[in-house]
Amino acid sequence: MSSPIRLKDHARDKRLIHSRLMMTGVFILLLSMVLVARMYYLQVVQYEHHSTLAENNRIHVQPLPPTRGLIYDRTGVILAENRPSFSLTITKERAGEWQDVLQKIVEVLQLDEENLMLFEERVAQARRPFEPVPILFELSEEQIALIAINQFRLPGVEVAAHLVRHYPKGKSFAHSVGYVGRINEDELKKLDKVRYSGTHHIGKTGVERFYEDELHGEVGYEEVETNARGRVLRVLKRNEAQSGKDIYLTLDYELQQVAKRALAGRRGAVVALVPDTGEILAMVSEPSFDPNLFVTGISFKAYGELRDSIDQPLFNRVLRGLYPPGSTIKPMVAVAGLDTGVITPSSKVFDPGFYQLPNNTHKYRNWNRLGDGWVDLDLAIARSNDTYFYDLAYKLGIDNLHKYMDSFGFGQRVALDVFGESAGLMPSRDWKRARYRQPWYPGETLILGIGQGYMQSTPLQLAHATGLMATRGKWVRPHLAKTVGGVPVTDESPHPDIKLSNSKYWESVRDGMESVMHGARGTARKVGEGSPYRIAGKSGTAQVVAIKQGEKYDRDKVQERHRDHALFIAYAPVENPQIAVAVMVENGESGSGVAAPVAKMVLDGWLLGPTADEDIEPQTQETE
């Protein structure tokens, strides 16, 4: 008999389904409670944190870089301005793989790999988050169009308008005004990150560097609302930046051009200043360079050409050029001799063409090998007689010589506001012992008395010392800025004046310097002929290579760059000095024949006007 067939147990299935539904419901309830708890935690417990994050994603504080102050010459001619320019910027945080984006920019604009390296260097610099970094300046219309067409391939890249520094006078003021350049890594570490937010350039040399704090200004900011792509939707708050201060310099554009023309392309330096005030009227170092090349980033090739040039256009000869001053220091040595009582204006020395120390056979030659016979102070200066000054230096001794030359500013920085000035070298006993571990020898005193040997000075120091001669020892530091932000520049720690035991000594030396230009036997008498005003001057030559005892200088046997340097100092008018000038022409050989005409053109340019007759031909009448 077969077993009965069991029918489906609906009651049991129902209980099973209910239990499963109950378990599912409980599970869903637990999940809902977890979600609610998490939502509560995020929206209530961490409300401040997440609301701040969301606000930061939507609202950004953007720096507003200040407009850099302008630089003018003393008459209002603009020397440094800000010119609008379209630049290409990239925001690293919005660019994603920014190296790839830079590569695409190079491809789109058809640039070379050198540009890619520059772009990477600029973007890699540590900056504030979400701050656009300019990578390419002076965009052309074609480049702007190419960027616009390819915008979808270049996230974080924008074309923006910027003010870019521009120097309208180009090479003329490169060594005085200087230039700005991109902030490098070392500078970035030292700068105030807040004050320089949004600023990508800083003064590198000259006035731009020395007065960086005044020219830069104060940064502003604005709060902006952006969309998810980083585009600015609206400005919520704005605090305007404060522009940098404008600077009026003491330099005179017209006189600067006169000095530049006077050098006529030769390597050299010219400095002109007002003796009573220290205002630098002209400051020319030749050859020069175009400072605009450095503003937006000079190419490796262009910089290499400037750096490696044998003529050294980047070298500021006025401030950093160190040259033996030669016979240009003889007036200062004469002042020392008179003030110490070693000589009087009428003291005479017999010159047979050489000088010998007591009990010594070595002959220290005068530039005039035939000698000048009996020579007093006036003739010694007019003829630049070496024998007279050998004897004077020997009688003074190195200690007195160092003391007085130091009082004239040699061996120290003399300027008030120039960047990169060299102190030069005024040797002494202690200096030689520390440097060479040797004693000082009497023969070294002799050659120091005619501005040779260890002594080195800059053209600026020579101009300053000439100004001291013109003002009878009134110490005024040379300076480039006349006013900064409308406020006159003053010297907060003035140097003490040179006080002589008898003020008439200044006139005695001045008479000799006047004879250089207007005396019957003056070394630069041809340059002074016909001048409508009286000039006090002094010529000089500085040896580049030594000449053996008994040999005579032969220019045909010496390479051009080994020939003597030509120097000349002057001030005028003699009765009421309004300008002092120092000129150095590298390898010019003759101070009176080459450097003196340059000085005369500068004097004429200031005293008679820039349109005065400038056709003064170089002379070769005297070695000095």
Image (tube, rainbow, N blue to C red):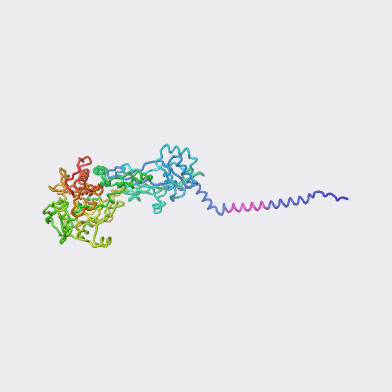
Majority SS type along the magenta span: helix
- Asked where in the image residue 403 lies, by quadrant, the reply is bottom left
Give the total number of marks visible in the rendering: 0
Residue at 44% from the left image edge and 37% from the top image edge: 145
Q: Nearer the viewer, residue 3 or 55?
A: 3
Residue 554 locus on image (x, y percent): 20, 48
Could you say where residue 453 lies in the image, as x and y percent from the top left? 23, 56
Residue 377 is one of the magenta-drawn residues: no
The answer to whether residue 558 of the structure is visible from this angle is yes
Query: What is the magenta range?
Result: 27-41
Taking the magenta stretch, the answer to whether it contains residue 32 is yes
Give x and y (percent) for residue 42. 57, 52
Pick the front one: 45 or 442: 442
The picture quadrant where one finds residue 332 is bottom left
**Above or below — where is 605 with respect to 433?**
above
Residue 31 position within the rendered picture, expressed as x and y whole percent measured from the top left: 64, 52
